[in-house]
Image: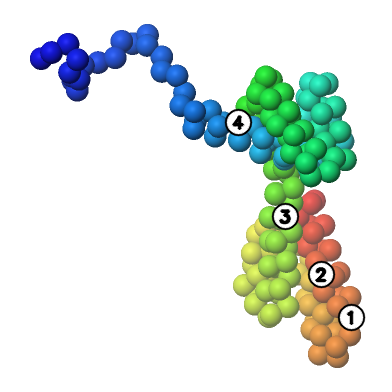
Amino acid sequence: MSEFEYDQDAEWPADWEFEKSKTQVKQELNALKDLGRSLIELSAKDLQKLDLSEDLYDAIISAQSMSKGALKRQVGYIGGLIADSDHEAISQKLQQLKQPHQGQVKQFHQIEQWRDRLLAGENEVYAELIAEFDDFDVQHVRQLVRNAQREAKQEKPPKSARQLFQYLQSQQQA
């Protein structure tokens, strides 16, 4: 084998580090810019919860009032500031900030499903709700369901359906 031939079985030295490709560097910078765009969408109150550096916080606040061209340059600047700081911690805190909202939406949809199933006349829902909540008042819920169904037939505003939703919501929060 000549000295210029490639040996496929050769192993790289363990301490040898490879440089990142240009594409990989660009992808990482774009990810940081996306994180910066997400931060720009937050309110000042939420930004304070993230415990950002003063320079980064000021850059984000100023970006919130910029026009398109200036905003594009500012996003690049913010991406650079994020790269200089602990971007993984910032990303993790941002996810934690958004998680409670996602949990609330999930609970809201669950309550809506229970209400809709009750109004549709599914009796199995009562057993689920009794198992779910300790002090579930079946008689009160049945009354609200009857009133809501009557209001729907008479094409009246859904006052009882709203009360049913509020009752289920109060049970879930208790």
The kind of residue tagged 1 is Pro
Q: What residue type is labelled 3?
A: Val
Q: What element carries label 2?
A: helix
Mark 3 or 1 closer to N-term? Answer: 3
| Real-space CA distance between mark 4 and mark 3, rounded to the nearest whole angstrom | 32 Å
* Residue 82 coordinates in the image, percent (x, y): 69, 26
In this rendered view, identify the residue nearer to me: 23 or 61: 23
Tag 1 secondary structure: loop
Of callouts 4 and 2, the N-terminal one:
4
Say above or below: 83 vs 147: above
The answer to whether any part of residue 25 appears in the image is yes
Q: Distance between the residues labelled 1 and 4?
A: 53 Å
Q: Name the residue under label 2.
A: 164
Q: Do the residues labelled 4 and 3 touch (CB within 8 Å)?
A: no
- The answer to which of marks 2 and 3 sits earlier in the sequence is 3
- The answer to the question of whether label 1 and label 4 lie on touching residues, with beta carbons closer than 8 A, is no
Q: Which mark is residue 105?
A: 3
Q: For the residues carrying marks 4 and 2, which lies nearer the camera in this image?
A: 4
Residue 39 lies in what quarter of the image?
top right
Residue flagged by tag 4: what amino acid is it?
Leu
Q: Residue 29 bears which disc, if any?
A: 4
Q: How crowded is mark 4: few (under 14 residues within 10 Å), some or many (20 or more)?
A: some
Of the residues shown, which amino acid type is indicated by label 2? Answer: Leu
* Residue 60 at x, y percent in the picture: 81, 32
Q: Is residue 37 above or below residue 143?
A: above
Of badges 2 and 1, the one in the foreground is 1
